[in-house]
Amino acid sequence: MTAGGRLAIIFDFDGVLVNSEVIAIAELQDILRDFGIDSDWDEMIRNFLGASFDDIEAYIHRKTGSYPGNAFRETWYARLFDHYAEELTVMPGAIELLDRLDDRGVTYCIASGGSYRRLKFALDLTGLGHRFGERVFSRDSVVRGKPAPDLFLFAAEHMDIDAGIVVEDAVPGVRAAVAAGIDAIGFVGGDHLASGREEHGKQLREAGARAVVTDIRDLLKFIGPGDTTMARAEALPIANRSRRGIKV
């Protein structure tokens, strides 16, 4: 990182700031059974953690020979949001982490593969929306989702930052950060990874994560006392801030 440059923490949202992936993946597992597709939990994590709607629809097509109907997304949202309303919680330690980042003057944002619709519902429900304001970026804003770098480059451009740390629970997200030239820290503290944290952490490291944490508050170990420097892992300057892949 260059002297005087601005550092931002770029959070994935689902499975990082909110404990949502355990809900979403379980609901998707049930929906896939409606199409005659039965997958165990490890297979669901492997195939769908960090996946987009397009990825899910393409998977259903590969397995069944046909694409789901137009009502698929609306059915998914209705079922998912019902479960969110009853079960969604903020990730343990996330509020404390955001408070500490505010105290240190470190800026942060969300860059999620989820839709703005899903993000807004979850941010409003958990009360996190005011912490981020307009600093929320979705795969909806770019042509290519993760593992392409487009979303992180889009977020970096709008945040006007010189270096960043991405916090991700999914391999495609770590790969996207690496492709964008941004440091990545893997996070394996979500309930969806309870049965395989060690193995998933290994996969995140193999994808390019500099480190892996189970407690989200441990991210503070990688931010130096000067607020905009890395203590244990050098923050990478953000590469190639082109507008390639950005929807306008």
Image (spheres, helix red, strand yellow):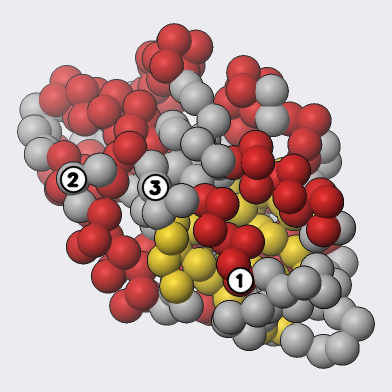
**As shown in the figure, which amino acid type bears the numbered disc 1?**
Phe
Distance in Å between CA atoms under marks 1 and 3: 17 Å
Residue drawn at point x = 37 percent, y = 63 percent: 171
**Looking at the image, can residue 180 be seen?**
no
> Image height check: is 190 above or below 123?
below
**As shown in the figure, which amino acid type bears the numbered disc 2?**
Ser
What quarter of the picture does the N terminus occupy? bottom right
Q: Is residue 164 left or right of residue 143?
A: right
First in sequence: mark 1 vs mark 3: 3
Distance in Å between CA atoms under marks 2 and 1: 26 Å
Distance in Å between CA atoms under marks 2 and 3: 11 Å
Q: What's the mark number on residue 195?
A: 2
Q: Which residue is mark 1?
A: 222
Instruction: List x then y, in percent, for residue 48.
Output: 30, 47
**Crowd tier of the residue under label 2, counting other residues whose Cα lies within 10 Å: few below 14, some 14–19, many 20 or above:** few
Element under label 1?
helix
Q: Which residue is mark 3?
A: 189
Q: What's the mark number on residue 171?
A: none
Residue drawn at point x = 72 percent, y = 74 percent: 224
**As shown in the figure, which amino acid type bears the numbered disc 3?**
Gly
Quadrant position of residue 246 = bottom right
**Crowd tier of the residue under label 3, counting other residues whose Cα lies within 10 Å: few below 14, some 14–19, many 20 or above:** many
Residue drawn at point x = 86 percent, y = 79 percent: 5
Residue closest to the eye, 231 or 209: 231
Element under label 2?
loop
